[in-house]
Amino acid sequence: MLFLQRRAGRAGAQTCLFRLARADRLDGGRPFVVTAGAGWLTEACAAAGIPVETLPFPSSRSLAGRLWGIRLWAWRLAARLRQFGWAPTIVIGNDHQESLLTRALATALGVPSGVILRSSGMTGRDFVKYGCGRHDVVFAIGEDFLGRVRAFPGGEKARPLFDGLADEDFIKAPPLSSAFPECALVLGTPHPDKGWGDLLRALDRLPAEAPVRHLRLDFTAVPSDVERAGLGLDRFDLSLCRFLGHTDDFASRLAGYDLVINASRRETFGMAALEALAAGRVLISSRTGVIERGLEEPRLLFRPADVEELASVLADLPAIWEAMPPVIDAARWRLAETFGIAGALSLFRAGVALAPRRS
């Protein structure tokens, strides 16, 4: 199987693709990954014995140029693959943005094509624009997102898939402190859908003496000045905020926190939140993605964009903190049973097996 993934830096889509490709290889498959350039993904694949090819992806602005650029790129890559003796049996794009390239390369190679849809912001217009319904097999990550995709024109054949957690995501976690933490890791980016503004507004509703009001918040991305203003950070005590930026070692970052907050308004799956649970961290989360399949503690969950409910969860947390270790242990067990990478690979292979073979 050949996977297309434009960006090679470490992020959710790339991490999940790597886990899937590595699991396929360890189970006797022969995955191959193509990216537009070098980065974390190419390094991880090389270390895992997964062949990688890098070739700049076309990016013409005009539609005609874009289509011609895609066709030329596909012919060039197909010739290079044949030169190295690679004969993929299917080409899979790792999200709708790779869909047109995926179909063009599959046509040049004379093999079926597929796409893994994973962007929560994808619309029906995007689905049609990128020709997602024209693939031989279409996967959608997460049950709610699958329902949305199946309602798009041509999306009826979409099949379920989930992003799997690997064994190393469940490594023995540092024990949680019995004392309420002094800081929390806040997942996401400054994009409004990630809920940072909701979190700040929820904290602002709490009385000054509330312990949570004095939490230091370590955000996993760095906002621009415009984004800071949009989030209302200029009205918040910035001495309590740090903006950490990207890391390729998310597991090590998680190990430094007992409390993680996921305030996202919309997720197809919510892998970062699941990784926090798998690492044994106490997680406060919106009810987005598949989080409730692992975390069943209602005192840690709130409705997306519901500032009042989030404020209530935050206010009550210190009183229940010492009861959290068994809650998180149970969540880790459920995640391992429900979203292990072996199960994801089985679902994926079952869908791929349905794609017609080209003569």
Image (tube, helix red, strand yellow):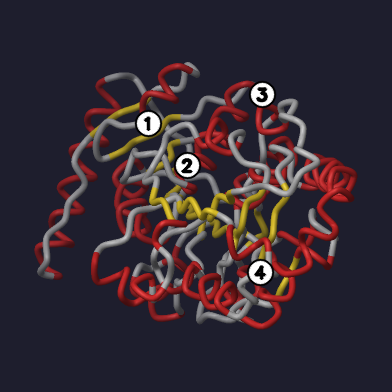
Q: How far separated are the C-alphas under marks 3 and 4?
A: 55 Å
| Other residues around mark 3 within 10 Å, as few (<14) / some (14–19) / many (≥20) | few
Tell me whether circle 1 and circle 3 mark residues in contact (CB < 8 Å): no
Residue that label 2 marks: 90
Q: Which residue is mark 4?
A: 209
Inter-mark Cα distance, 1 to 4: 44 Å
| In this rendering, position of residue 243 left or right of residue 218 | left
| Residue nearer the viewer, 302 or 104 | 302
Q: Quadrant of residue 97?
A: bottom left
Whichever of labels 1 and 3 marks the residue nearer the N terminus, that label is 3
| Number of marks | 4
Residue visible at 39% across and 64% down in the picture:
190
- Front residue of this view, candidates 28 and 215: 215
Task: Tell whether label 2 touches label 1 (CB within 8 Å).
Answer: no
Residue carrying label 1: 40
Nearest the camera: 37 or 320?
320
Eye-nearest disc, 2 or 4: 4
